[in-house]
């Protein structure tokens, strides 16, 4: 009788079980629960010496918008430029003509399934396309364009269910860098930043598109931080960070529960808060940061500390993540930092994941965690696998995924948050979207 070693049998059982596990979706910005946590198993723990396998590449137009992956399909926005020049100058507006598109691709092959396009002139700074990741929910796709066009489409066909022009309907001024607030689906509502008097944030019925409530007025601009549901509190609270303050709202009515002042430079409230043990950490450009303790009854939160140039981390494009008593984030010079959550003191910092030679203006790494491994996508177009903990940063390889086709102060960049699903990385620049296998052999 042939005797098979027990170790081989166990390996075979584990392999078969892993292959039968359903692949995770990444149906919105920052993943299923918007916390940058990826839970799929059977994933590589380091970059192999011979690199990773690119499963497919598909052409795509301009865009900072990251992809969403759901039900075996990839959804992403782009801009098909017809005329005008992208100057990449933070002080000026790009005047462009072209079409915004929501594109649906087969996640296994990259083949286009459908695309919905509409004419959309741009008058925004850094006009290289839309900014927001679509939100896929209940067979619908909710997409927000750079000039405030909000659409609800059927996920299977791309047919338009309803739409709103936020600028026209609410008298809203387009933010200097365009609308960047990823639509949030909460229960029967879809919530977005809009602008205008009394309508900085608006909630629509996700099925009909009818307005349910509107709330708040931004002094000048609405900023860029997406609406975020608080975690770890008994009374549900919708957190809105406008350029001068953080607000806690009743998500059902838009009623204001509380306000705490927090003002980043240049009106750049960008990064969504990160939560742990009933605390919310806010972080912004030029070392602006704050940790608050949320109240179960939605009364005013307790301010625990604020960071400065020598403490905490001031995140720019990429939001922070919190694990137990440690905050991790990337500041606007490319420093990946670990911070003690109770005190706000820095534990360590490194440029290894972003700009090993020297700090870079708005150097960026998008952080995603899977178990004890972190998957960082930097603005050079590289995927980095590493361990991040309170003791330091340990790298387990890098792989060049795609070319940085954008520009930041003369430095080539790609500023688009990737999706992690189907045991793959899905990432885009201004020319293509790629799918890279991260499945362990």
Image (cartoon, helix red, strand yellow):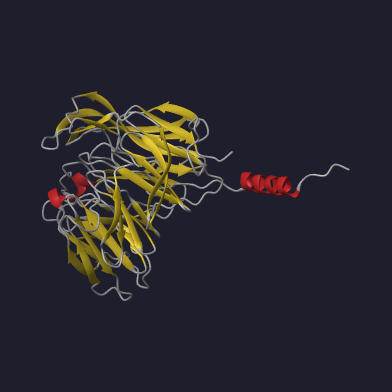
Q: Residue at x 76, y 46 (%)?
A: 5
- Horizontal placement of 421 versus 119: left or right? right
Q: Tell me the quadrant of the picture where the C terminus can be found.
A: top right
Q: How many marks?
A: 0
Q: Tell me the quadrant of the picture where the N terminus can be found.
A: top right
Residue 31 visible in the displayed image: no
Residue 44: x percent and y percent?
52, 42
* Quadrant of the rendered image containing residue 312: bottom left
Note whether 96 is above or below 209 in the view shown: above
Q: Residue at x 37, y 35 (%)?
A: 382
* Quadrant of the rendered image containing residue 62: top left
Residue sitting nearer the eye, 307 or 138: 307
Residue 187: x percent and y percent?
40, 60
Residue sitting nearer the eye, 437 or 373: 373
Residue 200: x percent and y percent?
20, 55
Q: Residue at x 21, y 32 (%)?
A: 121
């Amino acid at each position: 009788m042939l005797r098979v070693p027990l170790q081989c049998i166990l390996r075979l059982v584990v392999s078969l079980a892993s292959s039968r596990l359903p692949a995770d979706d990444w149906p919105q910005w920052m993943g299923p629960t918007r916390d940058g946590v990826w839970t799929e198993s059977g994933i590589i723990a380091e970059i192999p010496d011979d690199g990773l396998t690119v499963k497919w590449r598909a052409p795509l137009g301009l865009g900072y918008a990251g992809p969403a992956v759901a039900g075996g399909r990839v959804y992403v926005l782009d801009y098909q430029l017809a005329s005008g020049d992208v100057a990449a100058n933070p002080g000026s507006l790009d005047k462009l003509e072209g079409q915004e598109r929501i594109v649906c691709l087969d996640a296994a092959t990259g083949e286009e399934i459908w695309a919905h396009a509409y004419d959309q002139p741009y008058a925004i700074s850094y006009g290289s396309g839309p900014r927001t990741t679509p939100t896929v929910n209940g067979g619908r796709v909710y997409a927000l364009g750079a000039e405030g066009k909000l659409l609800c489409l059927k996920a299977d066909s791309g047919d338009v269910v309803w739409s709103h022009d936020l600028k026209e309907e609410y008298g809203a001024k387009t933010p200097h860098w365009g609308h960047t607030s990823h639509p949030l689906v909460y229960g029967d509502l879809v919530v977005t930043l809009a602008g205008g008097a009394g309508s900085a944030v608006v909630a629509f019925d996700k099925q009909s598109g009818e307005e349910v409530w509107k709330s708040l007025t931004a002094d000048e601009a609405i900023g860029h931080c997406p609406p975020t549901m608080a975690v770890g509190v008994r009374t549900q609270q919708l957190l809105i960070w406008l350029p001068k303050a953080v607000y806690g709202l009743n998500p059902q009515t838009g009623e204001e529960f509380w306000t705490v002042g927090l003002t980043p430079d240049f009106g750049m409230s960008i990064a969504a808060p990160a939560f742990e043990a009933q605390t919310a950490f806010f972080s912004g450009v030029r070392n602006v940061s704050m940790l608050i303790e949320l109240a179960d009854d939605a009364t005013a939160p307790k301010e625990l500390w604020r960071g400065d140039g020598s403490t905490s981390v001031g995140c720019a494009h990429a939001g922070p993540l919190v694990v137990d008593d440690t905050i991790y984030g990337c500041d606007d010079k490319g420093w990946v930092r670990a911070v003690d959550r109770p005190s706000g003191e820095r534990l360590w910092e490194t440029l290894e994941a972003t700009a090993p030679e020297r700090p870079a203006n708005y150097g960026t790494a998008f952080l995603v965690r899977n178990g004890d491994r972190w998957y960082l996508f930097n603005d050079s177009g590289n995927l980095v696998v590493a361990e991040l903990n309170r003791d330091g940063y340990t790298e387990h390889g890098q792989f060049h995924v795609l070319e940085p086709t954008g520009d930041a102060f003369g430095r080539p960049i790609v500023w688009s948050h990737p999706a992690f699903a189907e045991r793959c990385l899905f990432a885009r620049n201004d020319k293509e979207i790629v799918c890279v296998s991260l499945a362990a052999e």
